[in-house]
Image (cartoon, coloured by chain):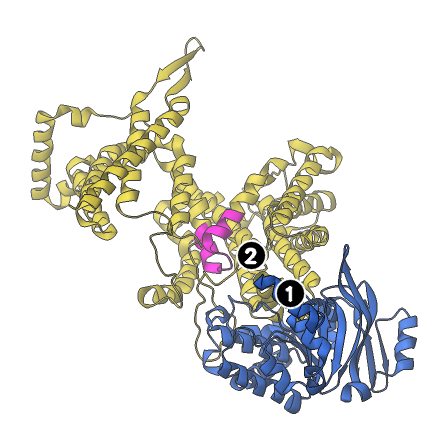
Chain colours: A blue, B yellow
Amino acid sequence: MRWKTDPLLVVESLTMRFGGLVAVNNLSFDVGRGDITALIGPNGAGKTTVFNCVTGFYKPTEGRLALARSGRADRDAVEKLTRSSARFARQGDNELYLLERMPGHLIAHHAKVARTFQNIRLFQGMTVLENIMVAHHNVLMKASGMTVLGLVGAPHYRKTEAWAVDRGKYWLNKIGLIDRADDPAGELPYGAQRRLEIARAMCADPVLLCLDEPAAGLNPRESLELNALLNSIRDDHAVSILLIEHDMSVVMKISDHVVVLDYGTKISDGTPEEVRNDPKVIAAYLGVADAEEFAEIEAEIHA
Amino acid sequence: MSGADSKAAGGALKEAAVAALITLALCTPIIMFRTDSDVNTGQLELTWRPLAVLIFMALAFFGRLAMLTWGLRPARAKAAPRVGAPTGVAAFFSYVIGPIGLIFLFVYPAVVVWYLGPGGALKWVDSYGIQILIYVMLGWGLNIVVGLAGLLDLGYVAFYAVGAYAYTLLAINFGLSFWICLPIAGILAACWGMILGFPVLRLRGDYLAIVTLAFGEIIRTILVNWTAFSGGTAGISSIPKITFFGLRFADVDDGFDAYFGMDYSPIHGKLFLYYVILGLALITNLASLRLRRLPIGRAWEALREDEIACRSLGINTTNTKLTAFALGAFFGGLAGSFFAVRQGFISPESFTFNESATILAIVVLGGMGSQIGVALAAITLIGGFEMLRELDFIHSLWFDLEIGVGFVVFMAAGLLSHRWLTAALAGLLALLLAHIVLAQGLANVFQVYAPPVYAMQQSVVAFLNAQLPWLYNYQLDFDPTQYRGLIFGFAMVVMMVVRPRGFVSTRSPSIYLTRRTAVAGDLVKEGHG
């Protein structure tokens, strides 16, 4: 129940319209710090749209996305920040960001939200290690004195680069790709590409990792490995995870908190057990409102 | 031969015949007639040239036949893409070509001067050496924008123009020396790069290309119309020449030559210019190579691969694109001011879209992102085009006949062997033999060094002369120099069919853990621009 006591991300009244289409309608939920939160729902429910709003790829039509990078997402503080025109507020240990006011790259850079994509977006023509190095862009950019110091080969830059390589090695070891570090990312098998995308996102040093269908296209063994990886990210690296997933074996096993969307609205929100037994969720997944209607449709089909 | 084979052969013949007919249709209005003005009366005379048309038809027929016979059809015949690093000779070549090329560039003028003397070397240092190096530098500059960042820039010549005019106007109006103007010109061009960058940041693909193209034309049009500023179409002449620490390269008492106690020779100035542009080009190269290994360079390449993923990793794509535009423009500006100081005269005519297209062709032909590829492409494109000016020697070598013999043998060998290499070797051998039999030039060599061979050749020639007089009186009314563009364009098309990703189609990674593995070109994206 951490999402109720210590929320990392507070989504309130999020609405996203594309012309006349309402993809997300007045959606509110919390993501707990240190939780694995799953966002599930039938196809077209608006899950990826929520992701795109959180990570800054879409600007929400309405709503507030408050992220407490450190400290607590205190109600009053959030209200105060909302009334100001600022994007973020820093008070002692409390760092509060309003994501809907920030462009995508700043969300990743300052608010520390990293993401992966439903259709893998690796830098295919670059090697595995290069992909990892690109994820360290902002740290390295600063160390290279916005390129000037790097051009003359300043020792500080070289040290930072070596640090980034070590960090990359650590993650490649973790995902079992250290032997393929010098191979082009595009040559990796599908499952390895998925893992690499997660490792790359982790190298951007996030507090919240958003995974868009990380188990899609994985075989059962790879799914298990993924579960272990995600658990380790949560437990060993203290990174909260928000994920979209259709594979219920992944969702139910590793999630601490499940939010169910249907037609852009939230229909259920709670622990995996609660959600699993929620009649509304069952109905949404079967595609009909209730059992009676279901029987009717069945009769029509057989007629 | 099986039924399917003969059917295929019949189909190939038919297709080749169609190609020949199309050629006839195309050539009839273009090549069949030539108008010459009569020297005495000044009236136009029509020359009818059916033979030339026939030759082109034959070329099309046999070319098409050859393509069909050897499966030279683009891509379809080739199965799996080449993946991974080049091996063997190719790998060795890729390691040594850099250093060897560098040494060559440094000793090239010395060798030329030593071999041809100061007078004869002038052309080779100036219109080959300097001219090519300017384009190498421009290619490397544009490579940052197109090759690394993947932003298609069709108006690169604008920055070249900004550099050239910046130096010219600063030098003429404020009397500043070249070395002070050079960085200023570069920075001004970089500013223009950013000015161009801002509006096109959100554009992709065709849209980006068309706006950059328009930008190039805007700069040129301003230069044409703002006469008070730029001198308009008349251009600006008498631009101050480059000096060697204040010493002019001129036949004067306080000139460079006099100061060092040498006789005046125009080659000294050219040699100095050569090493200046070589230095500038190498700086461009070094900077690009270094930048590639820095976070900004990786961000450029990542941007080319996937812009959305870049944003998700916190990369400011706006700044990244702007730096690419600005740095590319900076080097273009440097090259531009060098161009102005070398020419001594500039006008908007030098900065047409044609130039942008040439520079872009160099980058594309070289293999996008590859430094060595770009250099080789500049040599091929600029040097090759200059070379084709020198086609007069062809007549003296009995070119047509030899090529004809070589081609026929090549065809025959190819038909028999079904292998490229065998056919090419046979053709080459035939060419050589034909050359020995027919060329008088080589005969003189034999006369001195190998009298028996000379005697043999002479008897062959005498025999042929007696039996087949037409062979030696045969002269084609065909001047290859006039077909420079055609020959060149054709070579480019063949090149792009054979190597669609340019000379260097692999990408070298910017960092590695255990081994440097080249990334196959098929995996590398061209960018969205």
The label on residue A297 is 1
Instruction: Tell me residue B359's x, y (percent).
Output: 53, 47
Residue corresponding to mark 2 = B280
Q: Is the N terminus of chain B in the top left, top right, bottom left or bottom right quadrant?
A: top left
Q: Residue furthest bottom?
A: A236
Instruction: Tell me residue A184's x, y (percent).
Output: 48, 70
Q: Is mark 1 on a helix, strand or loop?
A: helix
| Residues marked 1 and 2 touching at CB (< 8 Å) | no
Q: Main secondary structure of the magenta part?
A: helix
Residue located 12% across and 26% down the image: B468
Point out the stretch of residues depicted in magenta: B360-377
Residue located 62% across and 79% down the image: A203
Q: Which residue lies furthest to the top in this view?
A: B41
Let me know if residue B38 appears in the view: no
Of the residues shown, which amino acid type is indicated by label 2?
Answer: Leu
Residue located 59% across and 70% down the image: B294
Judge from the rendering whether residue B317 lies leftward or rightward of residue B463; answer left or right: right
Instruction: Tell me residue B162's x, y (percent).
Output: 67, 46
| Residues flagged by tags 1 and 2 on a common chain | no
> For the residue carrying disc 2, how many other residues have a C-alpha within 10 Å: few (<14), some (14-19), or many (20+)?
some
Q: Mark 1 belongs to which subunit?
A: A
Let me know if residue B156 appears in the view: yes
